[in-house]
Amino acid sequence: MNMINSGILPFVQAMDAFFPIGAYTLSDGMETYVQQGIVHDKNSLERFLKSHLYVLPYTKLGFAAKAALGYDYELLDSLCSASISAYEVRNGSKKLCTRFLKAQSRINGLPMLQEYAGKIKSGSCDGCFPVAVGLFIRSFGIDISDSLSLYCYNQLSAMVNHAVKLVPLPQLDGQAALAEMLPHISKAVKTAVECEIDELGISGSGFELRCIQHETLESRMYIS
């Protein structure tokens, strides 16, 4: 009961790969990395995850952290939307956000999320999934470090699952690569919490480029 009351289990549910918001349809450029042969085995997947973990505090993880800490979510929404260069990734974030808010309205009815949904409907906000995640954390009053660590793990795990299917890789190779990243998650979370708001939006140009290139792939399994 304490885990439920603390919001940890509802957050685990919200971050579950099977939570019905369509996150499994987005690869965030992983499909391009595989098609170009950059990610092709366990070692190259580890290099990808390490690089991705390096920029996460200034992208998704950073925006979620600032929203959870009580920063102006309308400002964060505009910054988050403006910082995503690739159309498909930006549009995917909007769709995830809308579906997440709709699902949470039915399941938990959190006023802060309902307010954000209203802002999106009125057009004063675009809708960014990391901001919605941060507001969920703030609404439940979950421990910032624990919840952001779970969110970070969710992002890395999704990348691994995509790579396993796309390369393809043995499941154990994917999980071994993911395990190598676990000790570094706490540092990424600490950076996300402590970074200045002006630093949000810093990202690896390679990730941005692969996401943009994904839009014109001749064949693909994922939306982004």
Image (spheres, rainbow, N blue to C red):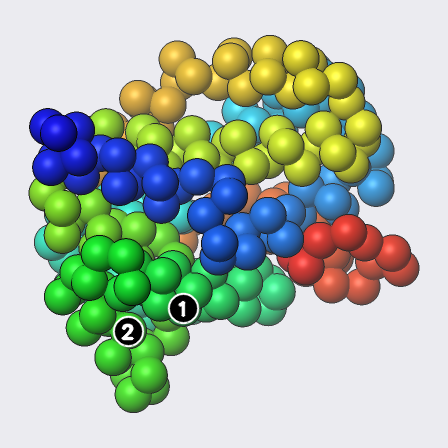
- Residue at image position (28%, 73%) is 117
Q: Which residue is mark 2?
A: 117
Q: Nearer the viewer, residue 107 or 68?
A: 107
- Secondary element under disc 1, as helix, strand or loop, is helix
- Residue at image position (30%, 22%) is 186
In the displayed structure image, the side of residue 29 where residue 169 appears, left or right: right
Answer above or below: position of 115 versus 202.
below
Answer above or below: position of 144 versus 91.
above
Farthest-out residue, bottom: 122
Whether residue 17 is visible to the viewer of this picture, yes or no, is: yes
In the displayed structure image, the side of residue 107 where residue 17 appears, left or right: right
Q: Nearer the viewer, residue 65 or 121?
A: 121
Whether residues under marks 1 and 2 lie with C-beta atoms below 8 angstroms apart, the answer is yes
- Residue at image position (39%, 13%) is 183
- The residue carrying pointer 2 sits among few (fewer than 14), some (14 to 19) or many (20 or more) residues within 10 Å by Cα, namely many
Expressed as whole percent of the image width and height from the top left, the position of residue 210 reads 69, 50
Q: Nearer the viewer, residue 83 or 20?
A: 20
Earlier along the polypeptide chain: callout 1 or callout 2?
1
Q: Which residue is mark 1?
A: 98
Expressed as whole percent of the image width and height from the top left, the position of residue 140 reads 13, 46
Whether residue 199 is visible to the viewer of this picture, yes or no, is: no
Answer above or below: position of 92 versus 161.
below
Tell me which amino acid carries mark 2: Ala
Snapshot quadrant of residue 109: bottom left
Answer above or below: position of 123 versus 132.
below
- Secondary element under disc 2, as helix, strand or loop, is helix
- Residue at image position (51%, 32%) is 156
